Each structure stands twice: as C-alpha cells, then as structure tokens.
Amino acid sequence: MANLHGRPDGLKIASLIGVLGVVYGDIGTSPLYALQASLTYFTKNGLKYTDIFGILSLIFWSLIIVVTLKYVRFVMRADNNGEGGILALMALAQRSAKSPKVRQYLGLIGIVGAGLFFGDGMITPAISVLSAVEGMEVVSPGLSVFVLPISIAVILMLFAGQSRGTGAVGRLFGPIMLVWFVVIGALGAYQIFLHPFVLQAFIPGYGIHFIMHHDFIAFVALGAVVLAVTGAEALYADMSHFGAKPIRAAWTFFVLPCLVLNYFGQGALLISNPAAADNPFYKIAPHILQIPLIILATLATIIASQAVITGAFSLSRQCIQLGLVPRLVVKHTNEAEEGQIYVPQVNMLLAIGVLMLVLVFRSSNALASAYGIAVTGTFLCTNALAVFVFRRQFGWPRWKVIAIFGSFAIVDLVFFLSNSLKIVEGGWVPLAIGLSIVTLMTTWRRGRGLLFARWQQDSLPLASFLARLPQSRIVRVSGIAVFLTGNPDFVPGALLHNLKHNKVLHETVFFVTIKTLDTPLADAEERCTSEEMAPGIYRVLLSYGFMESPNIPRALEALKDRGINFNPMQTSYFLGRETIVPAMVPKLRWFRRWIFLFMVRNAVSSTEFFRIPSDRVVELGVRIAI
C-alpha cells in the first residue's frame, strides 16, 4: 500500500530503521552508564527510594526538555538547506548577520562548538566500549582483568576498519539497534511490572525535592544526569541523512519510550535491591541473559562510536571547506554516496586519543567525569547560535526567543556549571582537546588571512594586466593553462612567475577561483560560471557547498557545453608553492607562527585535494613573508 506521496510504506520503515543505526547510537547506549554514574554520590550513605525517584525524575525531564523540546521541537527547524550540525548552524547565523564583527563572533562560537565536538568524539568510543565490556564483571568478578584488553582490542578493530567505509556495515546498524532498543525496553518493562510504584518518578516534584533536599550534592549529581542526553546533538547533525520527519518520529514513538522504560526499570530494581547500584543496567537482566546482553551492548557501543567517528569525518571536511583547517586527505569510500568519506589523519588522531583515554581512566565511571563538559559546552554553543537564527532568520519576536531559548540556556548552563566542578577529576580533558582545536583553527584562519593580504598587496590587478596585454610582446603558445587564484580580480602569482621565467602565455587561459558557499551543496547548474575577459582568457568561478569535495577537472568539463575550448589532455595546471618566511616585523606570535608553519607543511597539496592529474601540474615557488 502506497502512502500519500506515492512511495511504498516499506521505504519509510527502512528509513526509520536506518535512523536508529546512525542517529541514536550514542544516546541509545547512555543507559549503560548514566544512572549508575548519577547514583555514585549516594551509595556510600545508603540509597533511599526518594533518591532513586529524584534522579529518575531528573533524567526523564532532561530527556523531555533538552532532547524532545530543544532539539526535536525547535533546533531541528534551523536547517541549512537540509543540513544540520554546529557548523551548518554557524553558517546560517552568519548569513543573517549584517556586521562583520558579529559574523566573527558567531564564527568563534561555531569553532568552539566544533572543538568540543571533537573532544566528545574521543570520549564517546572510550566510555561506550568500556561500559559495555564491564558487564563481564557482573557475570564473574574474576573476569575484570580482561575488561581493559578486550576494550582496547575492540577499539583497535573499530578504527582499523574505517578505511573500508561504512556502507556495508551501515546496513547492519539499523536492525542491530532495533533489537537493542526492544531488548532494553523489554527488560525495563519487566522490572516496572514487578515494582510499578516506580512510575511515581514521572512527577517532577520528586526531582525538585531531590535538589532542595541534597543542595550541593544534588548540583554535583546533575553532572552525571546529563549523561542521559549525550548524543542529542546527533539528532541535529545527522538531519541531512534522513530528514527531520523520520528522526522526530523515531524519537517520539520508539527511542524515548524504550529509554524511559529502561531507566525506570533500573530504578525499580534498585528499590528492591539497592546493592545492584554498582551496575544496575546489567543486573536488570536474568543471569542467563547477561552474556548475550554484553555481546549486544558491545555491538551497540561500536555502532554509537561509529556514528561519532563518521560525524568527525564530516565535520573535518566542513572545516576544510570553510577554511578553518588546512587541506587533509579526504577519501570517498562509496562512489554513489558523497557523504561516505574517510579522513586518515583524523582517524589516526581519534584512535590515539581514544586509546590514551582508555589507558589513563581505565573505567567508564572515571571517564564519566570527563564526558559531560564537552556535551554541555556544545549545547551552549548551539543554543547561542540558535537564538541569532530564530531572531534574525525566522523573524521571531524578541520575547518569544528569550522565553524559549532563555529557558533552554538556563538548563544548559546549570548542567555545564555542574560538570565544571569535575574539571580536576577529568573534565579538563575535553576542554584541553577543544582549546587545542580552537587554537589550531583560529591560527590557520589568521595565518591564511595574512597570506592573502600580503599576496593581494604584491599582486597586479587583472584589469591592468589585460589592458597592457595587446601592446605587449608576450608570445602566445598552443595549449590550455589553468591558474588557481583566491581573488578573481588579481593576476595569479603563478602566471606572473611563468611570464618572468618562460616568457610565454598559452593560447587559452583560465583563471579559476574556488568559492565555498554557506550552503551544504551547490546547485549543479551554478557549479561553474565563466566570463571571457580577453581573447582566449576566461575567468571561471567554481562553487562548492561546505559538504562537498572539489574536483576541478570534472567541473571544468562543463565549459565544453558552452562552446569554450577545454581538452583535459592539452591542459596544464599552474600552481604556486608558497614558502613562508618571517617578516621583519612578524604579525604572528612565535608560537602561532610555529603552529601555522607546521600546518602548512603537513597540508595536502592542491594537486591531491582538488583532484588534479599530477602529470599535468606545473608548480612555481614563491616566498611570502608574514
């Protein structure tokens, strides 16, 4: 039976199952550690049922306020041509800003959010895999010595398999997560059936009483409660893969009910058996089912980790296209799917970071202290950008923006401040990672800005060059030359050097400028625009979205449809190789200059990044002082 849009219902079901595998892996595995970490502060003095009710109430209302209302109901409306995530939101906010200074501040918020996301990307695989494998201790305490080696082995296999792409494995993600949610929901429902009075925790008064009764300890515990909403950012970031409707439907009618059933099931178990507080997730299952549950949980955490790693690859490509980091190797693992990419340098750094976290912290409980601050920091950045978008882009009245996003900001800020108390215990880790990445991004952007300004200062305006060309004695030789230029109004430095040394100009010349749009994808019809500036000399603008990887030779093929001579086999690409040297009065501090030079040396060449055939490239060196 077809739906109203004429598509089979089976496609909608397949989409919903796919959402489970890609979007909800992170938040779906939070029951492994969230309630256990929240109870850590109370088990020493004896666990009271009012404490259990209070924490369950806080977890439930956090899921409702942060995930259901903030992200699903409101933030997901702010899509950038269907694309979501912190950088897509940043681009959308900057588009609405009139002042360059405001755009700069919005860009900084986006950079900070991206840096914290990478910190989250390192912690998620570590805490998820550790918490799953720690179930072996429940089966037999003697197996605890194997937790660390098995966790390391799983993580190594996870990162080693990234180069093969996620396409084949991705088809298994949805069904496995479907089974995962059904199982954890059923286990929780069984415990609720045995102790139905735990459902009183739905009443928000228990959460309020918990906070008022425990004061500062309750404030500290909120830092663990927020672990229940980790992965909320994924709902927004993965919007382009499935669209908003399947994500909203899967959360409202399936994922949220299953999570709530499991959390309340763990609470029901603790009311009858407070001793189970050391690992309530695994102890809600009968002993005979614990080993299969460990295997299923390990698969689910691998999927959750995979989703974060894939998100880090996508975010890295966005950063490259937006000029926030140097060019990196971006490999496409699926010829048909543009979004399935592999970034080797990012994969290696993530793998090293995750392994170091596992070896240093050694348990999921210890890692919980480091986890929350990255998540809540990203929440705050998203909220700040959303305020600007809803006010300027959507034209909401000020009172409405303040009432809605001001309320969300209070909740996010309380969670962030609560987690800031754990900086000494491990919260410094994501902050250090985030600060390092922010430093790299701002240094790269500042350095490239100085290079461009210096290049523009030393360059010749294109109009002047073309005006002198007819009177010059420059010899025109057969063939096609392509010169890349960052500013289409100035002559590329590579052309001036070619004239200086070779004293010839090709019969057909293309000045090619790459423009990155603030939209995810560029329209195919607008990819390539051209203008003839003089006989045989063309100015070409190639537009790409921030989710696309440039391919200059393929884009230039469109020129043939416009009657312009372009033969790939007769084309030479002239590129400038920049050598950076310190100026007499350096404009970058020594440590930033060192970082910038290191990034320049390790950046992928233009030839590889723009997919230019290496046998058709001519490189001309130039020294630039900054």
Image (spheres, rainbow, N blue to C red):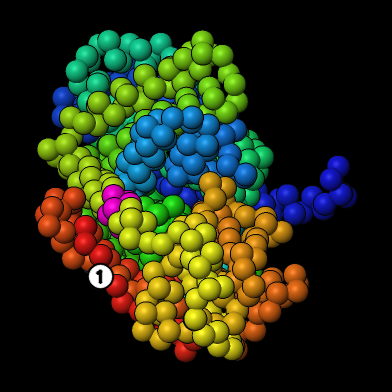
Q: Position of residue 506 (x, y in %)?
A: 54, 82
Q: Which residue is mark 1?
A: 623
Q: Is residue 592 above or below residue 417?
A: below
For residue 104, what is the image quadrant? top left
What range is drawn magenta here?
A: 444-451
Count all numbered tags in the image, as a single digit: 1
Q: Position of residue 59 (x, y in %)?
A: 40, 28
Residue 4 or residue 321, whichever sits in front: 321
Image point 48% across, 26% down: which residue? 388
Image point 16% across, 24% down: which residue? 45
Left or right of 453, for residue 356:
left
Image point 21% across, 57% down: which residue? 626
Query: Is label 1 in a helix, a strand or a loop?
Result: strand
For residue 382, what is the image quadrant? top left
Q: Position of residue 614 (x, y in %)?
A: 45, 85
Kind of residue at disc 1? Arg
Q: Residues within 10 Å of mark 1 (few under 14, many from 20)?
A: few
Image point 18% across, 51% down: which residue? 588
Q: Position of residue 66 (x, y in %)?
A: 45, 28
Left or right of 528, for residue 476:
left
